[in-house]
């Protein structure tokens, strides 16, 4: 299994995210548990382009300190919503025998959604732990409604939605 951490960047992580404290605690815990149990952690961050304020060299582009990548951990950059838009990311995953991805990060209705669907279409088993993806209120739905809509409806038949405690056990267990 790979723990895939999406867009946990200084320019996106904000207290206005739905269930911010729970989201942050659970995300940081899963990264820590994965590391402790030698489960590979892969990070992907979004580059919105030069001059956007969220591109290479901008502070907003950097991954937050709470889950900062450690030496040897892979970090990929994407320029579209799906992590699979990065050919190096795709190639890296394709050479792995284990086709299980536990996906956490931001934002539920953008990059997480696009990556979940792209992973499913490519035959990956997608695991979504409860409370480990979030988003902001938008013009159509609250952050809470958006998160529930994707987690409980849109992804219903394409992901293994698990309780947070179960996700921790999966990362700790034999064979991960």
Image (tube, helix red, strand yellow):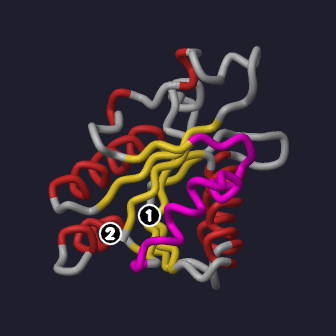
Please name the residue that numbered disc 2 is placed on: 167
- Magenta residues, start to end: 77-98
- Compared with 45, 94 (above or below) is below
Please name the residue that numbered disc 1 is placed on: 130
Displayed quadrant of residue 129: bottom left
Relative placement, left or right, of 44 versus 33 is right
What secondary structure is found at the residue carrying circle 1?
loop
* Mark nearer the viewer, 2 or 1: 2
Q: Position of residue 67 (x, y in %)?
A: 34, 38
Query: Dividing the image into 4 quarters, which one contains the C terminus?
Result: bottom left
Q: CA distance from mark 2 to mark 1?
A: 8 Å
Residue drawn at x 76%, y 49% is 141
User: Do residues under tags 2 and 1 come within 8 Å of each other at their CB atoms?
Assistant: yes
What secondary structure is found at the residue carrying circle 2?
helix
- Compared with 110, 116 (above or below) is below
Please report whichever mark, 2 or 1, sits nearer to the chain's N-terminal start.
1
């Amino acid at each position: 299994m790979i723990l895939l951490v999406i867009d946990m960047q200084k320019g996106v992580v904000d207290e206005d995210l739905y269930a911010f404290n729970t989201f942050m605690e659970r995300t940081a815990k899963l990264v820590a548990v994965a590391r402790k149990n030698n489960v590979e952690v892969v990070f992907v961050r979004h580059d919105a382009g030069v001059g956007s304020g969220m591109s290479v060299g901008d502070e907003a582009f950097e991954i937050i300190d709470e889950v900062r990548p450690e030496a040897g951990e892979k970090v990929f950059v994407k320029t579209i919503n799906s992590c699979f838009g990065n050919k190096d990311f795709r190639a890296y995953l394709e050479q792995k025998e284990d086709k299980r991805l536990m996906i956490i990060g931001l934002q539920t209705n953008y990059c997480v959604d696009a990556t979940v669907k792209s992973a499913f279409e490519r035959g990956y088993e997608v695991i979504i732990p409860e409370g480990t993806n979030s988003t902001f209120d938008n013009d159509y739905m609250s952050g809470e409604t958006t998160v529930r809509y994707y987690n409980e409806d849109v992804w219903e038949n394409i992901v293994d939605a698990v309780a947070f405690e179960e996700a921790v056990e999966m990362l700790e267990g034999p064979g991960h």
